[in-house]
Image (cartoon, grey):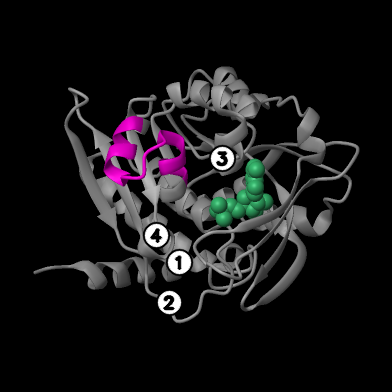
Amino acid sequence: MAITVVGSVAFDSIETPAGKRERCLGGAATYFSLAASYFTDVRVIAVVGEDFGRRQEAVFEARHIDTRGIERATGKSFFWEGSYLDNLNEAKTHATDLNVFATFAPKIPEAYRDSEFLFLANIDPVLQRRVREAMPQARLVAGDTMNYWIKDHRPALLEVLKGLDILLINDTETRMLAGNNNLVQAARAVLAMGPRTLVVKHGEYGATAFLRGATGDDVKLFRAPALPLEEVVDPTGAGDSFAGGFFGYLASQQEITPVSFRHAMFYGSVMGSFAVERFGTERTQNLSRKEIDDRFNLFRELTHLD
Ligand code: AMP
């Protein structure tokens, strides 16, 4: 099953305790697509500027990601600058320049229309909603957001949440969105905003799924660990790579069952663990399915009881 994703395709300048990179290829939709591409066909909707060249294009091509929905506009691509000097689990944002995204009107290529899976990666919720409305055939819709949009674009974001099956955000964002510091209470409040399932990412500590039952009161929990790593080079894109592994795996399955959902949570953790091993997309763009499955088995060993 193919996935269409809308979100930022960007240049990032990043500083971590392991070093610095200027203007490397980044963006939520970029990390998501690369991770999901190991599981299923991926189609991207985004806009880039004149600074996006053959080198960046080739990264998508090498993973057979459909880029017909990436529009080229006059101006500069989305630019984000962040650092992780005090805390590897949370980026400190120094600059967010929307550039060509500020005036982007997404157009969906005809060839994308049969996508049954839709992922609304991190970007202006107004754009997320437009793409959702333009793709009514999508059977499963998941999405992400971040503090930037939660703080200053709340009404538009609440509209997006109403149309989501699955929301994936980190714990700080969950607390911020709900206005409640207790994670379980915050998760319940977020589930009441629309999504049936909330996946809360805890950075180096894994991720927890909160699944709303039929009555709304019974919420089931499932937690996937993260892999303890000796060195985290660059946490940028870990969340988007988790989402790509998670949603890509779900899209590759005949049916979504409690078991395939739990496997998807582990594949999310697997892709997140690769993402942080090198700067930018360096690791995620150069994996093999065998490396991915080997690491999945390592996660199994890490957690199995009997
Ligand atoms: P994460 O997976 O949360 O580490 O996402 C990192 C990516 O999000 C970076 O590659 C940035 O380009 C992108 N990003 C940062 N801020 C925003 C924003 N406000 N909207 C959309 N994408 C963003």
The local crowd at label 1, few if under 14, some if 14 to 19, many if 20 or more residues have their Cα within 10 Å, is: many
Does the closest atom of ligand 1 sit within 8 Å of the Cβ of label 4? Answer: no
Q: Dot 3: what SS?
A: loop
Q: Dot 4: what SS?
A: helix
* Circle 4: residue type: Ser
* Circle 3: residue type: Ala
Question: Residue 280: image x %, image y %?
Answer: 65, 64
Name the residue that disc number 2 marks.
229
Residue extent of the magenta highlight: 173-189
Q: CA distance from mark 1 to mark 2?
A: 8 Å
The disc placed on residue 273 is 1
The disc placed on residue 269 is 4
Seen in the image, is 114 located left or right of residue 198? right
Does the closest atom of ligand 1 sit within 8 Å of the Cβ of label 3? Answer: yes
The residue at the point 62 percent across, 32 percent down is 152
Seen in the image, is 166 located left or right of residue 3? left
Q: CA distance from mark 4 to mark 1?
A: 6 Å
N-terminal of the pair, mark 3 or mark 1, is 3
Quadrant into which the N terminus falls: top left
The disc placed on residue 172 is none
* Circle 2: residue type: Leu
Q: Are marks 2 and 3 in contact (CB under 8 Å)?
A: no
Q: Are marks 3 and 1 in contact (CB under 8 Å)?
A: no
Question: Residue 291: image x %, image y %?
Answer: 44, 71
As displayed, is residue 173 above or below residue 300?
above
Residue 65 in magenta? no
Q: CA distance from mark 4 to mark 2?
A: 12 Å
As displayed, is residue 32 above or below residue 13?
above
Q: Dot 1: what SS?
A: helix
Quarter of image, res 77: top right
Q: CA distance from mark 3 to mark 1?
A: 19 Å
Question: Residue 72: image x %, image y %?
Answer: 83, 38
